[in-house]
Image (cartoon, rainbow, N blue to C red):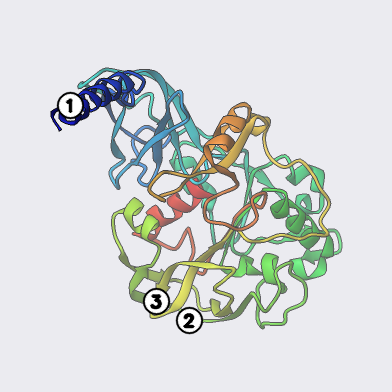
Amino acid sequence: MKQNYFFILLCAFALLINCKGDESTFSEDPAPTVIQTGKVEGKVTANNGTKPIGGAIVFTIDSNHKVYHTYSDADGNFSLTAPEGSTTLHIQTGDGRNFRTEIPVTVKKNETITVPVTESKLTQVAKMAYVKGNYDEIEDIVTALGYTATEITYQDLKNLNKISQYDIIFLNCGSRGITETGTSTPSNDVLVYTNLSTFVTNGGSLYSSDWASAYLVGGDTNTNMCNAAGGFINDNLLCLKNIGTATTYANCSVSNAALATAVGFNTLDITYDIGQWEKIQTYDSSFWEVLVEKNNEPLMIRTGNYNNPNAQSVAVGTAANNNQMTICHHTGNGNNITITIDASTWPSHQAHGDTQGPCSGGNSSSGKIYYTTFHNHATGNIGKTEPILEYVILNL
């Protein structure tokens, strides 16, 4: 009995020794690397150095292709937490293809550095053009921001090689062509529609106001019925009629959250200063996004969904964008962001799980189309519509 007792103790002791020896074959996971950070602060302005730009995305990318980002507020101010070390601070509006700035910075641990306002001005990368109108002058707003747009003629719209050198084309209300035989209007020119369709399909963006709806859905100098001749956007996607009257729409809503944050308000009054203007009758909500409205009547809309599968493939835009690509960066918390990156870094971003094209969906190669029922150069002060139009310019 006693021998059995000692035998059991001996076995237990041997087992204890063996288990202790096995412990040496395991090791704990290495402690996670602690990322030291600092802050970068500054103010985003237009190229004129005075107009604050809200809604600009400000970001850095670390060596593991993790993106640290924030947005400028309505006063242009931003504060970004980023890893310490030398990096590039990116500032972009829209998807970054047309307006962006890169600034080398050195982030210091637990310190805040301030970027001089002279360096955080938003740079124009895009080439912009406009067709002069009788009632609008969007080019004045472009110039006031410190940017440039080249005047092209209605006849230039018939030359695809001419318009394809631009990234953005502004179509002012009341623009049309004068020929030796008389007045030329969109409904007369299939070639104008074909070229604009090709331009947008290949990445060019359009801004069109009021009567310039004729460039989109058809019509003579304006669109007076839903089945107007011409156009490159189907009538089932957008129907307008020239039946608006001179009036002021009070308490209009800025229904797009990003736009409201960027401009710093969500309601405004809009004055329609001519006796007839284009009222949106119907629209396809899966194709258009409403940005400004009055009691569910759309007043400003945009789309990035246009695509003509039969359009020829042409290079659109400036050489400055040749090595850039727009991607949707997938963050860990699902708050995905659209940014433009150097194309050479795409494989690493792809391995991270990012995807090509904007996060908002739509055709990744298509440009945007903005349409406003209201003018950009109304008689007198255009009030709160001006910062909205500035947002449009910078986010095309």
Q: Tell me the CA gap for discs 2 and 3.
A: 15 Å
- The residue that disc 3 covers is 294
Residue at 37% from the left image edge and 75% from the top image edge:
248
List x then y, in percent, for residue 175: 65, 60
> Going from the N terminus, do you reach mark 3 or mark 1 first?
1
In this view, the residue in front, 297 or 176, is 297
> Going from the N terminus, do you reach mark 2 or mark 3 first?
2
Task: Please state which of the two labelled residues, at mark 3 or mark 1, is closer to the viewer.
Answer: 1
SS state under label 1: helix
- Location of residue 28 (image quadrant): top left
SS state under label 2: loop
Above or below, comparing residue 304 to residue 357 in the picture: below
Q: Residue furthest right?
A: 181
Residue 318 shows in the view:
yes
- The residue that disc 1 covers is 3
> Going from the N terminus, do you reach mark 2 or mark 1 first?
1
Q: Amino acid at mark 1?
A: Gln
Task: Please state which of the two labelled residues, at mark 2 or mark 3, is closer to the viewer.
Answer: 3
The reply to whether callout 3 and callout 1 are in contact (CB within 8 Å) is no
Above or below, comparing residue 323 to residue 139 in the picture: above
- The residue that disc 2 covers is 245
